[in-house]
Image (tube, rainbow, N blue to C red):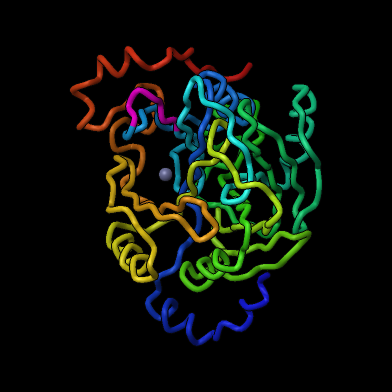
């Protein structure tokens, strides 16, 4: 399926990409659909020990929350976000969808994650070894597949808190650390055009194949820099719903770089949205050839733009254009129990 990839002249890639320095450095965030808001919040802050770094609403449907979970500051590359719809029908994983979302954990913490999940009586698959890394998989309350990967080759963000003395320890005292996103696995009917987008346009490099899984690594090998493609032509098409990923966002350094990406993706013939103001970053969206919705999001301004870093996620934050409707919005959102540190 990927055989043609080897025939792409390397000089073409250099002409179009490397000389301009435009390449994707890795994932910015992954956004998924959830069912009940409380169960979602409890799982990601409780079981996985992520920080709720922003509690806001879906800007396109403000009677729904938008939760952002991540590291202490919500660094790009650490973020998994959710739109929880209380009565959402379950989705179905299939082609044109993200099959799993993986977080990095340090090698020293992998065994304690296995022990912790076993102690809590949680179902999980593994541990197994994939591309030389220890991996375990579990599902969230809506069936979204999450993996924890201890990958000796995967760099983590040096700015991210990673140890018991890091700030995360102040609110997550009993959790082995999660170090941000490791990779996403895309399930596609045919992988070649997606692979070409990753290599020829995004600047990713083919990094190996194992059991039908083709791995691509962002140039420079930074954190959250891996994409796996599963080519499964016999599988049914996926259906969006609770427990499925809505889109995968990649990083742009700033708004100028995002404009360059928009021009480049338009020139390739994709439909791309205008730049949208997501308050904590700016976004453009387009559907990649395998059917997964891709976003390119700016690193700035980040989550401290409307509340202090120490109290991220504690209050419902609305963008200026929704603030006038706050009372009505708050009435329609489901109530939440305050999140407390685990015992
Ligand atoms: Zn997004």
Give the number of callouts.
Answer: 0
Q: Is residue 105 above or below residue 18?
A: above
Taking the image as drawn, is residue 102 in sight? no
Most common SS among magenta residues: strand
Q: Is residue 167 above or below residue 202?
A: above
Q: Which span is picked out in magenta?
A: 61-67
**Figure quadrant of the N terminus:** bottom right
* Horizontal relation, residue 174 to residue 171: left or right: right
* Horizontal relation, residue 147 to residue 287: left or right: right
Residue 235 image offset from top left, x and y in percent: 69, 50
Quarter holding ligand 1: top left
Q: Which residue is depicted at the point 57% across and 40% down? A: 239
* Horizontal relation, residue 206 to residue 170: left or right: right
Check residue 238 for magenta coloring: no
Residue 317 image offset from top left, x and y in percent: 31, 27
Examine the image and state in which quarter residue 113 appears: top right
Examine the image and state in which quarter residue 332 appears: top left
Q: Is residue 256 above or below residue 129?
A: below
Residue 228 image offset from top left, x and y in percent: 64, 57
Examine the image and state in which quarter residue 231 appears: bottom right
Taking the image as drawn, is residue 201 in sight? yes
Q: Nearer the viewer, residue 90 or 10?
A: 90
Residue 82 image offset from top left, x and y in percent: 48, 33
Q: Which residue is depicted at the point 54% across and 37% down? A: 166
Q: Nearer the viewer, residue 342 or 23?
A: 23
**Figure quadrant of the C terminus:** top right
Q: Which residue is depicted at the point 44% across and 68% down? A: 23
Q: Nearer the viewer, residue 236 or 165?
A: 236
* Horizontal relation, residue 273 to residue 202: left or right: left
Q: Nearer the viewer, residue 246 or 150?
A: 246
């Amino acid at each position: 399926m990927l055989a043609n990839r080897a025939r792409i002249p390397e000089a073409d890639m250099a002409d179009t990409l490397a000389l301009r320095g435009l390449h994707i450095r890795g994932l910015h965030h992954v956004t998924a659909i959830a069912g009940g808001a409380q169960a979602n919040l409890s799982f990601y802050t409780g079981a996985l020990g992520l920080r709720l770094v922003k509690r806001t609403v879906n800007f396109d449907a403000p009677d729904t929350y938008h939760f952002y979970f991540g590291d202490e500051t919500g660094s790009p590359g650490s973020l998994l976000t959710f739109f929880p719809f209380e009565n959402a029908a379950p989705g179905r994983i299939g082609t044109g969808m993200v099959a799993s979302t993986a977080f990095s954990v340090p090698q020293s913490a992998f065994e304690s994650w296995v022990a912790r999940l076993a102690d809590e009586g949680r179902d999980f698959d593994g541990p197994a070894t994939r591309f030389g890394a220890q991996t375990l998989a579990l599902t969230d309350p809506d069936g979204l597949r999450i993996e924890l990967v201890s990958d000796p080759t995967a760099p983590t963000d040096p700015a991210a808190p990673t140890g018991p003395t890091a700030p995360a320890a102040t609110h997550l005292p009993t959790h082995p650390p999660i170090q941000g996103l490791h990779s996403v696995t895309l399930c596609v009917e045919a992988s070649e055009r997606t692979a070409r987008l990753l290599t020829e346009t995004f600047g990713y490099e083919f990094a190996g194949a194992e059991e039908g899984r083709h791995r691509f690594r962002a140039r420079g090998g930074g954190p959250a820099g891996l994409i796996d493609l599963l080519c499964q032509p016999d599988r049914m098409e996926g259906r969006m719903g609770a427990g499925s990923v809505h889109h995968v966002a990649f990083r742009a350094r700033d708004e100028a770089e995002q404009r360059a990406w928009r021009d480049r993706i338009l020139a390739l013939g994709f439909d791309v949205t205008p730049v949208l103001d997501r308050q904590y970053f700016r976004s453009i969206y387009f559907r990649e050839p395998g059917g997964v919705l891709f976003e390119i999001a700016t690193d700035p301004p980040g989550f401290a733009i409307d509340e202090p870093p120490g109290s991220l996620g504690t209050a419902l934050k609305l963008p200026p254009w929704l603030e006038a409707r706050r009372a009505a919005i708050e009435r329609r959102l489901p109530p939440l129990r305050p999140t407390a540190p685990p015992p």
